[in-house]
Amino acid sequence: MKKIKISVRSLVELIMKKGSIDNRFVGNIKAIEGIRGHQRVQKSYGDEYTSEVSIKHTFSFDEIEIEVEGRMDGLLIENNKTIIDEIKTTTKDLLLIDENTNPLHWAQVKCYGYMYCIHNGLDNIDLQVTYYNIENKSTRILRQKFKICELEEFFFALINEYKSWASMEKKWMEIRNESIKNLKFPFEEYRQGQREFAVRVYKSIVDSKKCFAMAPTGTGKTVSTLFPAIKAMGEEKTSKIFYLTAKTITREVVNDTIRLMKKQKLNLRSITITAKEKICKMSEINCNPDYCLYAEGYFDKINNALKEILNKYDDFSRKNIDEISEVYKLCPFELCLDLTMFSDIVICDYNYIFDPRVYLKRYFDVKKTDFTFLVDEAHNLLDRSRNMYSAEINQDTFIKMKKIIGKKDKRILNLIKEIESYFLEKSKVLDVMKEKYLVENELPKALLELFNTLMKFMDEYLSRSNEENSDLLDLYFEVNKFISISNFYDNNYKTIYSDELLGINIKLFCANPSDLIVEKINRSKSATIFSATLTPLNYYKEIYGSEDGDFIINLKSPFDVKNRLLMIGDNISTTYDKRKDTAEDIVEYIKACVECKDGNYMVFFPSYKYMELVYEKIRDKYADLNVIIQENNMSEEEKEEFLALFNNDNKETNVGFCVLGSHFSEGIDLTEDKLIGVIVVGVGMPQINRERDIIKEQLNENNKGFDYAYVYPGMIKVLQAVGRCIRTSKDRGVILLLDNRYSTYRYKSLFPQEWNPYVRIKKPNDIKHLCENFWDNE
């Protein structure tokens, strides 16, 4: 029998949700107020109340097993009687709320009630919906007793509506699984280590383990993870695959790999989730039916449209989503999210799993799933998660808002003045200390109390105002994020007060998000965590929660070392205090490296300022050398124009000056003669600052804090930049690293296997001789 899983929430919304998308501010509280309201209600009952109770029920029809699962807000025992509680937070007057206010609220608790009765042999049960008003902290409880026959009738009315979807899904799974049985590895042979990699990914899914993999460029990591995951899906070892990546270009590689396998008549549905701001068809993101025709009647149209769409398409790439949404006049972003329910592979950014504000709640509100995570470019996830779980706010925001709000709302104005006073007090403390920073180990509780009151006042004002309030809305969401992140605050956090150009800045800084990352990863059945630069591997195993029995693989580069010349100039210092002194030496090293063969080169620097210093020197001394410099904050179009200068048809030498860690050091793929040389100036170490020092202090177990905060992140940038040079087995190129720290054990111990052999050089003339010999032997 085919097992199909659906959450109570998804079931209810799929069958019952009607109307339009309308995200206008109508006084509805946001996520954090909802969470707090839930917690207050749950705590008010004491020991007789069990919060967040998972429940699932499986039943069969027509050779289909449907597993319905969900999480009850609360289970209350009162006078030996069980009551299931569904909590809803609101700003509405509770006297205006009754049993008919929102049928979806009762629908969820009825489903829970039926499943609970079945599991516990009950003939009837009391169900309640608790409405909690966050403004006055009042509560209204609506309670009804239901017989099991009533709940069964309601539940199976939903299921009968869902049967057509389940039957359609069963048919698709049979077609998909049959095609997967016949699927062969899409290349004539495996590259070195590739079969071993694929086997370990497969076993990690079957055994519900993690797989950690260092997979250098050229090892074919995309197909090595996708192919075994798809084979495991065909054997029903996993029901959905999430391919997670930080880069748009990587998502395209994933789609190309899936299309390659489809040439074997593989039937598979895949979807790429594109951010709302990139895929929205309107001139501004304004999700309401009065403005957007794609929002109007969305929930009335979506179910019929989905049935047609699923019969016509199986590739939901950004291009196809754009076309489909136009045909059916449906919001492309919401369509993406709805199609994930019926897709086998979901290709998306990390934030759809890890970000506490935007993750896919429809899948991850339960503690455990049978999904597979393929986490590509996993070296990026750590810093990305630090950003997701940190929040900051600046004094200048409130100074500006004080002018805007003026006399419109006295309560908001007065509260902003109180908040301003808080910032001024912190400014005085910093002045007395004669410091730019103040770091504390606890939350700014007084400020948070002011913020909570401000949220209430803004909520009320925005609900009744008919004016354009974009600035106040921006403040609303900024304050809301700050409050939301405060709920995660523990000993992995610090509060940083800093005196900035625009006034005092307050940041809740998540120095070590490891526990939060692992908690999200562990909601999957299996996760493969891989990158070309997962260095050092043991560090990332620790950060991402490696356990006994997890699979580990460290692949060698498949490229012939004879196709590259790696030189290390370890007699030159690039530390901050030496940069002006050695800038002219850097120029000579660059000139010596690029003059031996016409072609395209890239030089990577640790900062824009350093890059501009060397650029001025090289322009003054070698004006005939064509040097193109990366500008700060380049648009997508400007990045494409920059890369267009690097092509196979160049008859002269082009040298691109770029910054380590930027788009050009990780997100590009210049093959064959498009790039014949890479020069890295420095060791990529992040600028020493308060946040990095906090990370160093937080992770200083075994005296490794400096490495974790500075050395490893910098070296990963270097490895990524070096990896731009040789992208295929046909590529040839020269690589030059300039910094005396490369001769120390701390850095040499991080050299990947493919960096051997390398040549140490002491002067620019050494480069000329080596490069001439290398290119003569083409």
Image (cartoon, rainbow, N blue to C red):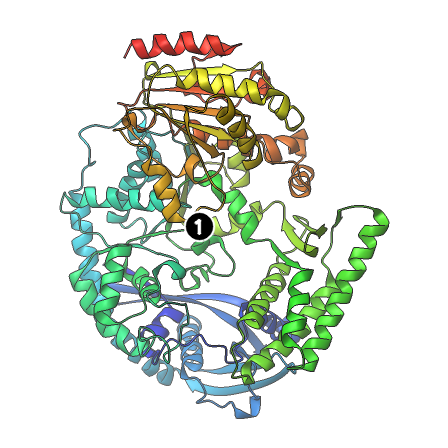
Name which residue lies at 46% across and 77% down: 24
Q: Is residue 79 visible?
A: no
Decide if residue 559 is on the left or right side of residue 213: left
SS class of the residue under badge 1?
Answer: loop
The quadrant of the rendering that contains the C terminus is: top left
Q: Is residue 261 visible?
A: yes
Q: Residues within 10 Å of mark 1 (few under 14, many from 20)?
A: many
Name which residue lies at 49% across and 16% down: 568
Residue 684 placement (x, y as % from top left): 54, 30
Q: Is residue 297 above or below residue 398?
A: below
Q: Is residue 515 above or below residue 25?
A: above
Residue 477 placement (x, y as % from top left): 56, 67
The quadrant of the rendering that contains the N terminus is: bottom left
Residue 131 placement (x, y as % from top left): 55, 82
- Which one is in front, 352 or 612? 612
Residue on which the image places disc 1:
350
Q: Residue furthest bottom?
A: 95
